[in-house]
Image (cartoon, grey):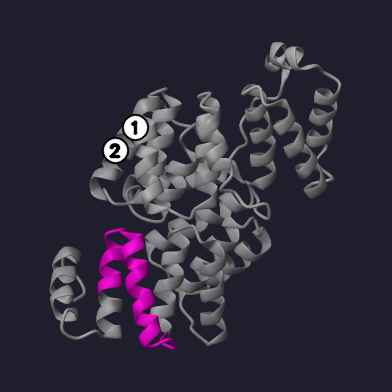
């Protein structure tokens, strides 16, 4: 069914699956959902396929790709390494491993797999993406921007270059150009949750706050367990002084996550702005035990312990109020 319209494939396969469950058919439908960028539906089907036939390497590769696009990097890495250990050899796997390691800030491992992928024949699109990812991973901003400039006109609406472009270029190109490019990409791929997330960020950037909030709600429906999104939404509501909502999303960030220290620090400020000085101090106590090397918690706690309640509110503008970066 290669080259078929994904929606027609889904309809056809769904009709057969009603009478006869099949791992291959679940895999085919999962691929069709993946092509449409409906990642949650693709995930449901590939898991059904793996439950029936757990050892199929093609099933596992698609599972790894879906986990990556759902930003479930630990699960994506587990699947990808299982493939590597099983002898699955393909440029797509090396690129996927590089992407996962890059997201986890393991730059040496990312570059190892990028170099490995360049030793085999790649399509022009994949080669452009690999060079872009490699330049970005080592912090070579000039080379990264040149790569994007040279290839974006051709590949901008395609995954995965588009995801990198819209993630990093929002502050580097004029707003009107960025908006037009993003809307064009979204028109082509309306179900892509990453493009929708970048649209929410853009709306927040131009202070269209009610619209941004609605778009974020749609993004959340596609990333229901996404910790970085919880932190991002906490930051969004914190910037817009909706402190209770900010706290609700910061509470979803677990303590063993890369976003947790920033979430706890900003949450302590939220409680302070809400006039809950004791709650802020209690949170700072917990955070100080969890992150003893982070001086911010000790410093803010010291300031609060040496300040009465009235002066806490009066001097709120002197506190750190920048939101943590995503």
Residue ID at (28%, 65%): 33
Q: Position of residue 191 (x, y in %)?
A: 29, 51
Which residue is labeled 2 in the image?
183
Q: Position of residue 139 (x, y in %)?
A: 63, 46
Please give left or right for residue 275 compared with residue 297 in the image: left
Q: Residues within 10 Å of mark 1 (few under 14, many from 20)?
A: some
| Quadrant of res 142 | top right
At mark 1, the secondary structure is helix
Residue ID at (42%, 62%): 126
Q: Position of residue 66 (x, y in %)?
A: 41, 66
Can you tell which mark lies on residue 242?
none
Q: Main secondary structure of the magenta part?
A: helix
Vertical placement of 242 versus 47: above or below? Answer: above
Q: Nearer the viewer, residue 8 or 267?
A: 267
Q: Could you tell me if the residues under marks 2 and 1 are in contact, i.e. CB atoms within 8 Å?
A: yes
Report if residue 133 lies within the magenta region: no
Residue ID at (80%, 16%): 308
Q: Position of residue 75 (x, y in %)?
A: 53, 68
Residue ID at (55%, 45%): 143
Instruction: Decide if residue 178 is in sight here.
Output: no
Report if residue 49 lies within the magenta region: yes
- Numbered range of the magenta stretch: 29-56
Which residue is labeled 1 in the image?
179
Spatial separation of the CA atoms under disc 2 and disc 1 = 6 Å
């Amino acid at each position: 069914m290669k080259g078929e319209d994904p929606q027609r494939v889904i309809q056809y396969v769904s009709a057969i699956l009603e009478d006869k469950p099949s791992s291959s058919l679940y895999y085919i439908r999962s691929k069709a959902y993946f092509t449409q960028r409906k990642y949650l539906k693709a995930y449901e089907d590939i898991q059904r396929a793996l439950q029936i036939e757990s050892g199929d390497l093609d099933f596992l590769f698609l599972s790894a790709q879906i986990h990556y696009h759902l930003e479930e990097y630990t699960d994506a890495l587990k699947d990808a390494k299982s493939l590597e250990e099983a002898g699955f050899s393909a440029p797509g796997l090396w690129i996927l491993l590089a992407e996962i390691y890059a997201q986890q800030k393991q730059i040496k491992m990312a570059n190892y797999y990028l170099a490995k992928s360049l030793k085999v024949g790649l399509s022009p699109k994949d080669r452009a993406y690999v060079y872009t990812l490699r330049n970005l991973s080592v912090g070579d901003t000039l080379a990264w921007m040149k790569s994007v400039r040279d290839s974006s006109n051709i590949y901008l609406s395609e995954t995965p270059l588009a995801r990198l472009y819209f993630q990093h270029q929002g502050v580097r190109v004029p707003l009107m150009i960025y908006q037009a490019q993003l809307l064009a990409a979204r028109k082509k791929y309306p179900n892509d949750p990453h493009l929708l997330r970048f649209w929410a960020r853009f709306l927040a950037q131009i202070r269209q706050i009610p619209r941004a909030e609605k778009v974020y709600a749609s993004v959340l429906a596609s990333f229901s367990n996404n910790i970085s999104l919880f932190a991002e939404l906490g930051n969004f509501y914190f910037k817009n002084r909706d402190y209770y909502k900010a706290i609700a999303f910061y509470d979803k960030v677990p303590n063993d996550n890369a976003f947790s220290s920033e979430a706890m620090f900003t949450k302590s400020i939220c409680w302070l702005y809400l006039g809950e000085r004791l709650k802020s101090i209690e949170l700072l106590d917990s955070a100080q035990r969890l992150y003893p090397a982070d001086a911010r918690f000790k410093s803010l706690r010291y300031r609060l312990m040496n300040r009465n309640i009235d002066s806490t509110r009066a001097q709120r503008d002197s506190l750190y109020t920048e939101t943590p970066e995503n």
